[in-house]
Image (cartoon, rainbow, N blue to C red):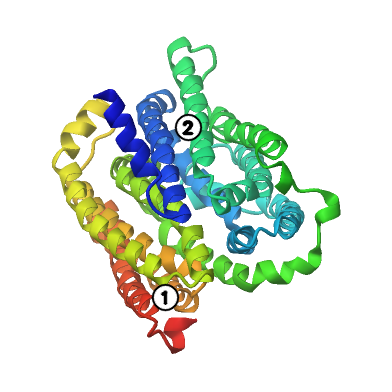
Amino acid sequence: MKIKKIQFIYNFLNTGNNRTTLLKKNLLFSSFFKFLSMCVSFLVIPYSIVYFNSNDYGLWLTISSILSWFIFFDVGIGLGLKNKLAEANANANFQLAKEYISTTYAIISIISLTLFVVFYVINNIINWNLVLNTNINLEELRSIILSLFGIFSLMLILQPINIVLQSLHKQTILSFIAFLNSSLIAIVIISLKVQHFIGPSLKMMVLIFGGIPLVVQIISSLYIFKFKLAKFKPNYQSIDFSKFKDLMSLGFVFFLLQLGSLALFQTDTIIISRFLGTKSVTIFNVVYKYFSTILILIAIIMAPLWTAFTDAFNKNDYDWIKRIFWKLNKFWLVISVFTFILLIFSDLFFNMWLKNSVIIDHKISIFMTFYVIASSFFMINCYLVNGIGKLILQLLLYILITIINIPMSIFFLKTMNISGVILSNIICLIIMSIFLFIQNLKLINRTATGIWNK
């Protein structure tokens, strides 16, 4: 019986063309490590809330959310690299791929250093207590925030390895790195909680939640380019700044899309912290964490599809694109049902998981359910246009959403608290998803013209 099961799995993984079989293998092994990583992260959250307390943990979430924005400030070169590297690899032009990678590292290093110098200056001007709605020692807070920004600046320099792995269809390695990060953080947090040999503090959170991923990223990058992807290893001789134009042909548009994404997805914690306090940030985060299991599943499936769509588009394989697109939409209907199942069991899960360290209003869970369903549909529809580089309509939609989302969030928050912020996001996601779905229909049927084809 076991032999038959193994044979079935083997046949499933190796049925189809090269692109499809590679996609299946990435999905299977990535899902395994993502699942382990998700389990570990669920384990560590209640320990973190109890050890650091809900207010300080919420403050950490807000600070890290703000500063993590700067990871996106590579002016889109990283995402430009994703498409260009996928093209070069599809054409077996490995020297060109190496030049793109080396140039990306060089440019992002310059950007990161510049950002750190600028932030070093303005950090001494910003009243972070006013921004974060807290009242701890301002100089100590500035020192902590500067240290964390330094970590994020180094992570910005190191992040092209993630793009390289995605472009070369090696998402399994990325998932394993994420699992390693989660596991090490969990081990440290639980050890501190049990042994109490070091007291909780914001500095400790920076070292744990910021320092551990940084060390893992450094070691992983060195190992991967040394042993796994030696032919793509960046070096000084392969830097060619004339490639900047190629990387930015789509890269700058991706950068603008990232800014729009920040306005939609990353401003929630700031708004909640500013108007409701850091404890409410913790409540928002744990509810999102529970329901985001659906989004993690969607992300696992979509991650390898970006470059797969790029490859198929460059080879004019529209039949494959159309088939995968409709399978994804059917999958979205199934996943929406599972999201409602999560809602049914949400109160029971929160009681077992958090043990009353945080009290969750069921209304927040209801709104988060619809947010996850809308967000899943949006992800499915934007990955196709991102993969084939038809970005202008999405950019215009993000401009609209950037204008309306924050004031709408504040307006709804005043009467609905946390649920109001989530409702604003739902409305924005629905607007964008409708237009992107129409665009995708036109693209796969080759009827897209004008703004739909740009």
Q: Nearer the viewer, residue 135 or 386?
A: 386
Tell me which numbered mark, 2 or 1, is placed earlier along the sequence: 2
The residue lying toward the viewer, choosing from 347 and 52, is: 347
Res 1 label: none
User: How many numbered circles are shown?
Assistant: 2
- Of badges 2 and 1, nearer the viewer stands 2
Q: Nearer the viewer, residue 271 or 70?
A: 70
Q: Is residue 439 above or below residue 47?
A: below
Amino acid at pointer 2:
Phe
Q: Amino acid at mark 1?
A: Leu
Residue at the limit of the structure toward the right, as seen here: 237
Residue 419 placed where, x, y %?
Answer: 25, 54
**What residue is shown with label 1?**
397
Dot 2: what SS? helix
- Residue 424 appears in the rendering: yes
Residue at 54 percent of width and 70 percent of height: 314
Measure the alpha-carbon separation of dots 2 and 1: 34 Å
Mark 1 surroundings within 10 Å by alpha-carbon count, few (fewer than 14), some (14 through 19), many (20 or more): some
Residue at figure coordinates x 48%, y 73% from the top left = 316
| Residue identified by numbered label 2 | 179
Q: Position of residue 387 (x, y in %)?
A: 49, 65
Does 439 appear above or below 244? below
At a point 51% along the width and 59% down the height, the residue shown is 307
Residue 22 falls left or right of residue 381: right
When asked about the image quadrant of residue 372, the answer is bottom left
Q: Please rate how many residues cluster around mark 2, counting C-alpha atoms within 10 Å: few if below 14, some from 14 to 19, many from 20.
A: many
Q: Nearer the viewer, residue 320 or 206?
A: 320
